[in-house]
Image (cartoon, grey):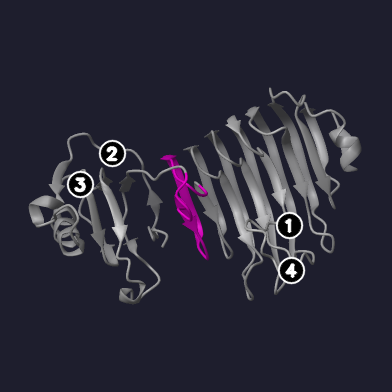
Amino acid sequence: MAMKLLISLLLLSTYAAEAQVFDVTKYGAKPKGEISQALLSAWKEACASPTPSSVVIPAGTYTSNEVTFSGPCKAPIEMKLVGTLQANPNAASFKTDGWVVFEHIEGFTLSGGAPGDSPNTDGIHVGRSSQIYILDTDIKTGDDCISIGDGSQQVHVERVTCGPGHGISVGSLGKYPDEEPVSGIFVKNCTLTDTSNGVRIKSWPASPGRTTASDIHFENIIMNNAGNPVLIDQEYCPWGQCKSLDPSKVKISNVSFKNIKGTSSTQEAMKLVCSKSLPCENVEIADIDLAYHGPEGPANYTCANIQPKFTGKVNIPEAAATCGGAAHA
């Protein structure tokens, strides 16, 4: 079960070094034991502290039932996971769809990590929210570092380092009925290292209902050995179990990928595959400099159902001509 973050206002990754430590083992937590009450007790005291505080889960493996950490707190607060926290294996014990929830907190830092192969462990997921800022954050996980779901409006992601992980994604979209539009997404000045994907928009085929994704912009992104660095995938079907490959009903428009540079771990450095029934519109590709050093040859591209506008320098040969887009100096 994915960890949920419900954090109001601003997620901060800077933190005072002199924070007071609240070790959960001082509140009764023991390795191989259930520690939800110890966590809540430590959090209650730390949240009431007038100075910066850190709730620490030390080395060891612990189990926790569903738990909610609520604010507001009196000072900046950190949850620091050094050991391993596991969910209660009895799914029937969960009364809600959240396992670990943080809410109504300003000046919050969550530190720890997840193995690069851990499934369904998005670092931060945003959905049906507006005016969200994710700044100065370092994420290492086994799924999307940041995923932006339906109903997201005016989301700003800046100065994020991502990797390992699946990259920074808008979506997946179009899997469920009654999804809300996505608009106003700005991802800037980020670095992705050893990720399986770069910056992407993804939607499922055979969507049960129509929706839109618009005004989405990726700019000033550094790729260090990232797979699929520039990606629009409207045939997203990660487990190959889609009942139909009917076109996606998510309309993508007003999108830009600008100043994206570095190295790709896949020969296909740019993939723009849009819906057959709702082709992408007004997509700009500008100043793309991505190198691939594998034995197959230089970086290449795939595109379908899109006529992007190419501006500046794009170092993928003949991309503009083959994609049917217009090249501009």
How far apart marks 2 and 1 lie (CA) works out to 41 Å
How far apart marks 1 and 3 lie (CA) works out to 42 Å
**Quadrant location of the N terminus in the rendered image:** bottom left
Start and end of the magenta stretch?
Answer: 117-144
Query: Residue 30's quadrant in the figure?
Result: bottom left
Q: Residue at x 90, y 43 (%)?
A: 324
- Pick whichever, 27 or 119, lies toward us: 119
The residue carrying pointer 1 sits among few (fewer than 14), some (14 to 19) or many (20 or more) residues within 10 Å by Cα, namely: many
Q: Which mark is residue 15?
A: 2
Kindly indicate whether the residue at mark 4 contacts the one at mark 3 (C-beta within 8 angstroms).
no
Tag 1: amino acid: Glu
| Number of on-image labels | 4
**Is residue 134 magenta-colored?**
yes
How far apart marks 1 and 4 lie (CA) works out to 9 Å
- Tell us which disc is closer to us: 4 or 2: 4
Q: Which residue is mark 1?
A: 235
